[in-house]
C-alpha cells in the first residue's frame, strides 16, 4: 500500500512543496518500496538508525534528520546527511560545524522553534535564535548553513490553534529573513506539518512537510519485557 499511499499524499501537496517521507522505525523494505515508487527524500530521528539505513540503501536518497540531535551522535550522520531540521541550541550547531569540517562538508540546517502548547516539544524562542545569530560564536562557524526554520504544532483537533501556530512559525521565518538573511537565496525553508496537519501547514506557507503514518502506516512499538 505504500506506493498507493504516496500517490494519494502527493496529490494533496503542491509541486513547490517538498515531501519528506518519515521512515523512522520502519524497515529497509518499506523504504525500498517508497523508493521504487519514486520517493527520494526520507526523514529519520535516530542517528544510528539513519546511519545503518544509509549503508544499505541507494546513494541517491536524500536523508533529513528530523529528531532531537545529541551532540555525541552527529559524527554518525555528518558524512552524508542532507539537512538537519532540529537545531535548537548554539551548542548543537557548533557540534554539527565541527563534524562537518572533519568531513569536508557544509551541512544545511534549520532552526527548530517551539510553537506548540506542549512543553515536551523541543525548540527555540525567537529571542534565543536571534542571540545565536548575532553571536561571535555563530559568525565563526564555516561548515554549516542555516536554510530556514522548523516547528511542530500542538497535537490537537483544534484546527484554529494549529493554524495559528503554523502562522507564528511563518512570521518567525519572515522576521529572521528580514533581519539576518536579507538577500540570501538559501534561507528559504519552512518545515512544518505532519501526517495529521500537513494540509493546514501547506496553506500557511510550508515549503517542506514531514509525513510518516499517511505513507507507511502507524508505527508499531514492540513491547519490552523486563
Image (tube, grey):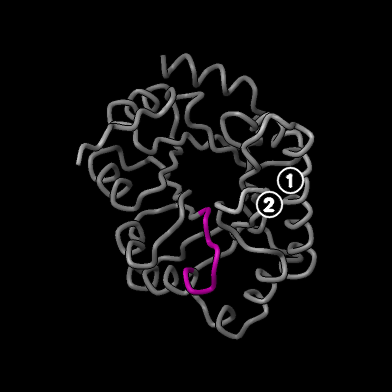
Whole-percent x, y for residue 123 in the image: 59, 59
User: Is residue 87 rendered magenta in the image?
Assistant: yes
Quadrant containing the N terminus is: top left
**Range of magenta residues:** 85-92
Which residue is depicted at the point 65% across and 43% down?
A: 153
Identify the image quadrant of residue 28.
top left
- In the rendered image, the residue lying farthest to the left is 226
Which residue is depicted at the point 48% across and 27% down?
A: 213
Give the labeled residue for mark 1: 165
Give the labeled residue for mark 2: 115
Which residue is depicted at the point 55% across and 56% down?
A: 122
Cα distance between the residues tagged 1 and 2: 6 Å
Mark 2 neighbour class, 10 Å CA radius: few under 14, some 14 to 19, many 20 or more: many
Q: Is residue 122 above or below residue 197?
A: below
CB atoms of marks 1 and 2 within 8 Å: yes
User: Is residue 65 rendered magenta in the image?
Assistant: no
Amino acid at each position: 500500500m505504500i506506493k498507493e499511499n504516496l500517490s494519494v499524499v502527493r496529490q494533496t501537496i503542491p509541486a513547490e512543496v517538498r515531501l519528506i517521507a518519515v521512515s523512522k522505525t520502519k524497515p529497509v523494505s518499506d523504504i525500498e518500496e517508497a523508493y521504487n515508487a519514486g520517493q527520494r527524500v526520507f526523514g529519520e530521528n535516530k542517528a544510528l538508525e539513519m546511519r545503518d539505513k544509509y549503508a544499505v540503501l541507494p546513494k541517491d536518497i536524500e536523508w533529513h534528520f528530523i529528531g532531537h540531535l545529541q551532540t555525541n551522535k552527529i559524527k554518525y550522520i555528518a558524512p552524508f546527511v542532507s539537512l538537519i531540521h532540529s537545531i535548537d541550541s548554539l551548542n548543537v550547531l557548533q557540534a554539527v560545524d565541527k563534524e562537518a569540517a572533519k568531513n569536508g562538508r557544509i551541512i544545511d540546517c534549520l532552526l527548530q522553534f517551539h510553537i506548540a502548547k506542549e512543553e515536551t516539544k523541543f525548540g527555540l524562542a525567537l529571542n534565543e535564535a536571534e542571540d545565536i545569530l548575532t553571536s561571535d560564536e555563530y559568525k565563526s562557524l564555516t561548515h554549516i548553513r542555516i536554510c530556514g526554520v522548523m516547528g511542530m504544532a500542538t497535537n490537537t483537533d483544534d484546527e484554529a490553534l494549529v493554524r495559528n501556530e503554523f502562522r507564528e512559525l511563518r512570521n518567525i521565518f519572515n522576521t529572521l529573513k528580514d533581519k539576518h538573511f536579507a538577500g540570501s537565496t538559501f534561507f528559504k525553508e519552512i518545515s512544518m506539518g505532519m501526517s495529521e496537519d500537513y494540509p493546514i501547514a501547506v496553506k500557511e506557507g510550508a515549503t517542506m512537510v514531514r509525513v510518516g503514518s499517511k505513507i507507511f502506516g502507524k508505527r508499531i512499538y514492540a513491547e519490552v519485557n523486563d
